[in-house]
Image: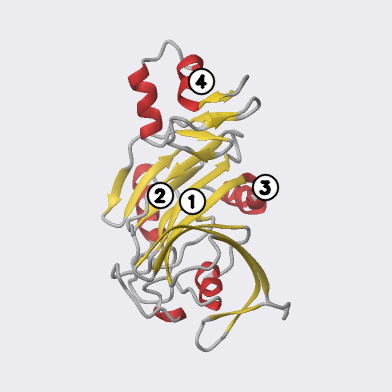
Amino acid sequence: MEITVKNDSPLLEYLYYALAPRSRTGIKALLGHSRIAVNGKITTAFDYPLKAGDRIGILDHGPARTVDSRIRIIYEDNWLIVIDKKHGLPTMSTGRENEATAYNILSGYVRESTRGGRIFIVHRLDRDTSGLLVFAKDEMTKRLLQENWNRSVRERKYTGVAEGIFDKKEGHLVSWLTENPKSLKMKSSSTDNGGKKAITHYKVLNQKNGLSLIEITIDTGRKNQIRVQLSSIGHPIAGDRKYGALTDPFGRLALHASSLSFTHPHTGRLLAFASPAPFRL
């Protein structure tokens, strides 16, 4: 369900008007359970300032279902599945024998639930990055999502903890990434060296004890993009030994895919999802 705002108003006040006669308690619950999006971005703020012309999305995804200790399905329809995966689980096989992956686990789930159904990878998260991930149930949906990814994705946000105290509370990182074929590590260059251009934006939310909690959005989806770019400016993600981290306060890579919203490739509806980061400062 989507509502176009007719006049400036605090969000909750407008929802009371637009969703009448639904109970006020029920409307507050929609906000509290991250089922309200404004212009494609989930918000839980009752006093969010709406402007005329804004679009409010009422999200219909229900309670998450756990199909494995490492995966929760938070949305599923005839064409796609959105999951919340734990750290330590790769999206797809890295060549290790009998390796557990998100792809394998979901493939088994879909085969059982739809009598021979299949699953297709749309995008990936690093093994040690947790959070939101989309899979398609057929090749056409996969193709539509991948070919229109930059246009259909309204928001793709991460939460991370980086080492050090940032001089600037907000910043934009633009560099070109290449991969060392032997170490498989990515290298970031501030000048165009023929690598893949990567664009990352960060905002500092909190800083404490030499660590910084940051919100990250990306314009591109390169391998290890966030990790290598932050390391290149002296702020590696905590727990990321591969890219120079000296601390490991959470016993894991402190990076989580926390927010994702995109246009459904078949229905045209806005889908928006949020997953709280499992670490705080």
Amino acid at pointer 2: Ile
| Residues marked 4 and 2 touching at CB (< 8 Å) | no
**Residue 48, position as x, y percentages in the image:** 50, 33
Mark closest to the chain's N terminus, 4 or 2: 4
Rendered image: mark on residue 134: 1
Q: Residue at x 42, y 41 (%)?
A: 75
Mark 2 neighbour class, 10 Å CA radius: few under 14, some 14 to 19, many 20 or more:
many
Residue extending furthest bottom? 182
119 over 177 or under it: above or below: above
Amino acid at pointer 1: Val
Residue corresponding to mark 2: 83
| Residues marked 1 and 2 touching at CB (< 8 Å) | yes
Amino acid at pointer 3: Arg
Q: State the separation of the CA atoms marked 1 and 4.
A: 32 Å
Residue corresponding to mark 3: 151
Q: State the separation of the CA atoms marked 1 and 3.
A: 16 Å
Mark closest to the chain's N terminus, 4 or 3: 4
Q: Circle 4 sits in a helix, a strand or a loop, which is it? A: helix
Total marks in image? 4
Mark 1 neighbour class, 10 Å CA radius: few under 14, some 14 to 19, many 20 or more:
many
